[in-house]
Amino acid sequence: MGKIPCVDTVQSCQLTLIGTTNASVYEEFTYPHFRFLLQNLTPDVPVVGIGVELAGNPIGLALARYSPQVYGQILSLFVVPSHRSQGVGTALMARMETELQHRGCTEIEINYLTSSNSPALEGILSHQKWSTPKATALICYASTDRVEKTKQPHLTQYLDCLLANLPADYSLFPWNTLTNKEREEIAQQVETDTLVRRFNPFSEEKKLEPLNSLGLRYQNQVVGWIITHRTAPDTIRYTQMFVNPKSQPLSRSTLLLARAIQLQVENLPHTKGTFRVDIDNTPMVKFVHRRLKPYLDEIRYAWSATKVLS
């Protein structure tokens, strides 16, 4: 295992393949929801962690998972601020590419959010011949405090109008009152319908937030839902929102989202919410910018880049 020289120091960085014996010192270098991967690094687990040390001290980490003989995904890349712009991130990415190729991956992917670190990462990707990053989604952040502070009469009137004009054949209901028969019907749709599968309401059920996970029925048939998850004591993620394309999906989706937000604001003051809108969902992207933006603390873009390995 060779040493990678750092530009501004006579010392050198040592790249290390992480295992169970040294994983704990790198946990703080990745996102909390990926730390369990480091805690379970064994030869039969399709996860690769590469750490970098300087004078015996950890200063960076690259973490990835993979499907053997197919595909690898870089989950996180981190270098401590005092050692950035010195080639450490570039070295980590190059070594990770080699490790994933050694494990049979023919294509690798990285996903990331717009941040102050994006230009540095994009410089590495360009240098190492990755594809040009493409925007894949809007990631939106809000808080009940902001919603309360920013209430605008025109939006309130718009939502009241949606509720008032909801045809009698439609009804909202708490998702945790879904019947067994309805569950079976939707599960069958998940198996056979690619659109429904994309918005699978049954993922991460252990984290389901019952307060504002809602369903929409039309003539006693479930035609839509908004599924939320409690990701932290003070944060709800609005994970899945779906309405059958035959049921005026934009206005019905808006109604589901508005009611779910209203329930959080009324019942959980001083809490936060996040949601994702795929960039190819043009109507919802426009709705976010035209209607919801004043209520949001932040909108960030999600990006994706790939590289084919020879």
Image: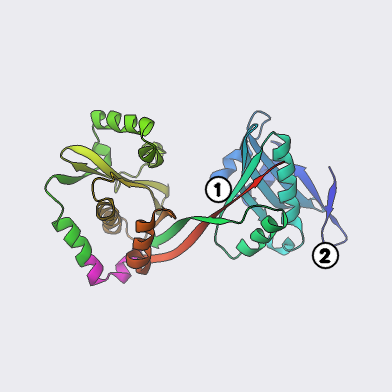
Name which residue type carries label 1. Pro
Q: Which mark is residue 185?
A: none
Q: Where is residue 187 in the image (x, y as percent from the top left)?
A: 33, 31
Magenta stretch containing residue 153, yes or no?
A: yes
Colour theme: rainbow
Q: Which residue is drawn at 30% across and 54% down?
A: 257
- Rendered location of residue 197, percent (x, y): 39, 37
* Residue at the image point whose x is 67% and y is 31% from the top: 42
Query: Which corner quadrant holds the C terminus?
Result: top right
Left or right of 5 on screen, residue 261: left
Secondary element under disc 1, as helix, strand or loop, is helix
Image quadrant occupied by the N terminus: top right
Rendered position, 183 above or below 78: above
Bounds of the magenta segment:
144-156
Query: x, y (%) of residue 244?
Result: 28, 44
Which residue position holds label 1? 32
Find residue 38 and report its image quarter.
top right
Which of discs 1 and 2 lies nearer the camera? The answer is 2
The structure residue drawn at horizontal position 36% and vertical position 35%, both measured from the top left corner, is 193
Is 119 covered by the magenta stretch? no
Q: Whole-Å distance between the Cαs marked 1 and 2?
A: 31 Å
Considering every residue shown, the one lying at the far left of the view is: 168
> Which badge, 1 or 2, comes first in the chain's sequence?
2
The prevailing secondary structure element of the residues shown in magenta is helix
Q: Name the residue under label 2.
A: 8
Choose between 154 and 305: the one closer to the eye: 305
